[in-house]
Amino acid sequence: MRDQSAADTVPPPARCPFGAGADRGGPAPYVSYARMDELHELARPLTDSPCELTFILISHVKEILFRTIHIELDQARTAIRQDEISVACEHLQRATRSQQALLTSWEVLSAMAPDEFLEFRDILGEASGTQSFMYRALEFTMGNKDPDTVRAWKAELERYPMLRAELRAPSVYDEAIRYLARQGAELPAELLERDVTRRHEPHPLVEQAWLEIYLDPAGRPVEHRLAEALSDVSFRFSVWRSTHLLVVERMLGGKSGTGGTTGLEWLRTINEHRFFPELWSVRTLL
Ligand code: HEM
Ligand SMILES: N[C@@H](CC(=O)c1ccccc1NC=O)C(=O)O
């Protein structure tokens, strides 16, 4: 008997995968499961500009990533509430991965020349990213419940129950602060039982609680890990905003926005906001 050669162990060639679904009499399972044909139907440019199609597609990509970030932040918040900080950090890290993908997606739009954008900008009318309810939900989850914005969204809150629920829920940061209190941080009831439909205002005792953790990272490894995982999410959010600002400057210069703002000037103000503010200010004290 001859030795078994390597050739004998090679499996037969697989069926060519490229025609999958061709003889099924319907869409391939990949297409029907995630309704890919409907997904592609959604992008319907109003002009012949190929750049408009790209603009719509990238806008869709960003919306979807807002949602995956929201899913992870929501789970992180639940885990913090249950004192499962290791699980919370895993979700925060996954949120960070989606944020990274969101950041990278700017590469596509930033490569569009201003004249190519202006070719179809008129047909956007008053449509603007400010009207994204998924982005707004994300800001609420992170704790930015700016009173002017909440007022402006009053009618839309009726339309989107998910957004309404998010406004009424404690933010990820509210849950982190309550966790710090459960770990022994001296935090007043006015903070722990505050009206969570309002924006969190920076508080010296929250800064003090983070300071104690950063001064003893080896003794407080779990809280330290949470602080850094939250810092990562906040940092990437700010990078997203500043990249958006740069793309807008490159595309529009000083033109006003379709949403009725001054454009660059307004975006610069928005850029100064920080999520989880005491995690930023505590750096000065170290
Ligand atoms: C050529 C590309 C873009 C330009 C020139 C642009 C421009 C602007 C401008 C001028 C504003 C200020 C509000 C206004 O008056 O409209 C704004 C806000 C905003 N944009 Fe964009 N944008 C672009 C792409 C995007 C994309 C792809 C997204 C993601 C889906 C996005 C999301 C937002 C959001 C969420 C806001 C509101 C920010 C906040 O409320 O803090 N933008 N954009
Ligand atoms: N505010 C932008 C337009 C804009 O961002 C936009 C308009 C319609 C659909 C999506 C948009 N942006 C993000 O998805 C502008 O002033 O040109």
Image: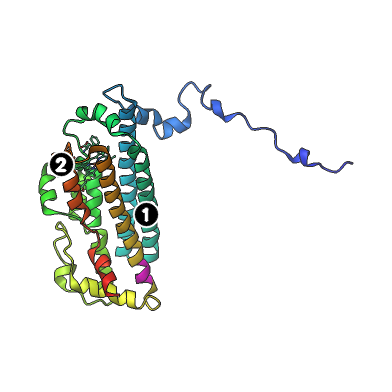
The disc label shown at residue 96, or none: 1
| Category of crowding for the residue at label 1, using alpha-carbon neighbours closer than 10 angstroms: few (below 14), some (14–19), many (at least 20) | many
| Left or right of 256 on screen, residue 56 | right
Q: Secondary structure at mark 2?
A: helix
**Residue at image location 53% in from the left, 27% down from the top:** 20
Magenta residues, start to end:
222-226
Across and down, in percent, residue 6 comes to 77, 42
| Quarter of image, res 152 | top left
Residue at 36% x, 53% y is 95
Please tell me whether residue 30 is drawn above or below residue 242 in the rendered image. above
Q: Quadrant of residue 249?
A: top left
Is 206 magenta? The answer is no
Task: Give the mark nearest the N terminus, 1 or 2.
Answer: 1
Query: Mark 1 to mark 2: distance in Å?
Result: 28 Å
Any part of residue 95 in sight? yes
Amino acid at dot 2: Glu
Q: Tag on residue 156?
A: 2
Q: Position of residue 241 (x, y in %)?
A: 27, 50
Instruction: Inspect the image, locate mark 1, and give the three-letter code of the amino acid beneath it.
Output: Thr
Secondary structure at badge 1 equals helix
